Image (cartoon, helix red, strand yellow):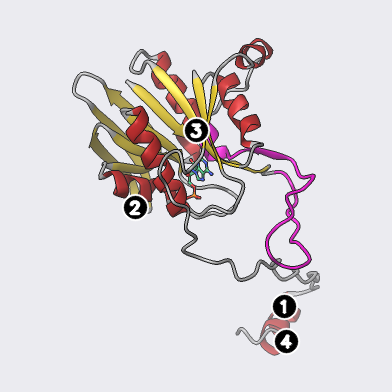
Amino acid sequence: MKIMVAIKRVIDYAVKIRVKPDKSGVETSNVKMSMNPFCEIALEEALRIKESGQASEVVAVSVGPAQCVDTLRTGLAMGADRAIHVDYPGSLYPLSIAKILKALVEAEKPGLLLLGKQAIDDDCNQTGQMVAGLLKWPQGTFASKVVLDKEKQVATVDREVDGGLETLCLDLPAVITTDLRLNQPRYATLPNIMKAKSKVIKKVTPQDLNVEIKSDLEVVQVTEPPKRKTGIVVSSVDELIDKLKNEAHII
Ligand code: AMP
């Protein structure tokens, strides 16, 4: 069985985000970019499934500008067997990504599609659900544990929900999106970084996949959150109650 993993290139989680002066988006030039952390977890899970003998190949895919190749190289250095870069320089939203992933799934025929539960740049948390809907495949979202049974062709997925843990049994092929506690992704070792240089990254365009990119939503503006006012230290409970009553008017 082949596993396909969708990985997104995003602004590194440790970077302090700056909004562009014209409020059209956030600054991405000269900013450190990395693999979306939830996608690292998805890739790690695919590699562990392969290492346990339940899958034969891990294919990493990424949609976006030319620099996505760097993110795919990181995925190959972590252990993916090969990669596909869908080259598209413009803005992309979850429905377009889901249509592209559906076309890739139809071409590659994986038994499992793994995605992060959300991308930390847009926080959409939509792509996995949309691609499962388009493919008419069962979905296990926010997975905190995944167990595959190759013989029975099922995946058992634990999901962290408000009331506790929900366990689902999905018929394969299926879509699974990964939550934070599923695993601890590995670091790419130097020998594997070297090996990754000779692994194949195939380049295609949305047109090659017969996917028309139509923007069905428009970002009107992006603004920074209001600055937090500095706090004060009160000297007594009476002063605190006085301030809550007469200044903050909350009691
Ligand atoms: P989102 O719905 O945007 O929060 O993204 C959820 C997941 O969809 C990500 O963690 C990725 O696995 C996948 N995804 C989103 N955008 C892309 C992209 N441009 N290329 C590859 N995978 C993506």
Vertical order, 183 against 92 (above or below): above
> Mark 4 and mark 1: span between their CA atoms?
10 Å
Front-most of residues 181 and 154:
154
Q: Label 3: how many residues lie within 10 Å, few (<14), some (14-19) or many (20+)?
A: many
> Mark 2 and mark 4: span between their CA atoms?
38 Å
Secondary structure, mark 4, is: loop
Which residue is identified by label 3? 61
Q: Position of residue 148 (x, y in %)?
A: 30, 25
Task: Give the residue type that dot 2 points to.
Answer: Gly
Instruction: Indicate which disc residue 240 carries.
Output: 1
Span of residues in magenta: 14-41
Which residue is identified by label 2? 163
Q: On the rendered structure, is 168 left or right of 98?
A: left
- Which of the marked residues, 2 or 4, is nearer the chain's N terminus? 2
Instruction: Indicate which disc residue 247 carries.
Output: 4
Task: Give the residue type that dot 4 points to.
Answer: Glu
Front-most of residues 97 and 193:
97
Indicate yes or no: mark 3 CB to ligand 1 under 8 Å: yes
Report the quarter where the N terminus lies: top left
Secondary structure, mark 2, is: loop
Q: Quadrant of residue 182?
A: top left
- Which of the marked residues, 3 or 1, is nearer the chain's N terminus? 3
> Mark 3 and mark 1: span between their CA atoms?
55 Å
Please identify, in this view, whether the residue under mark 4 or under mark 1 is nearer the observer: 4
Indicate yes or no: mark 2 CB to ligand 1 under 8 Å: no
Q: Which residue is located at x 25 percent, y 45 percent? A: 136
> Mark 3 and mark 2: span between their CA atoms?
34 Å
Q: Label 2: how many residues lie within 10 Å, few (<14), some (14-19) or many (20+)?
A: few
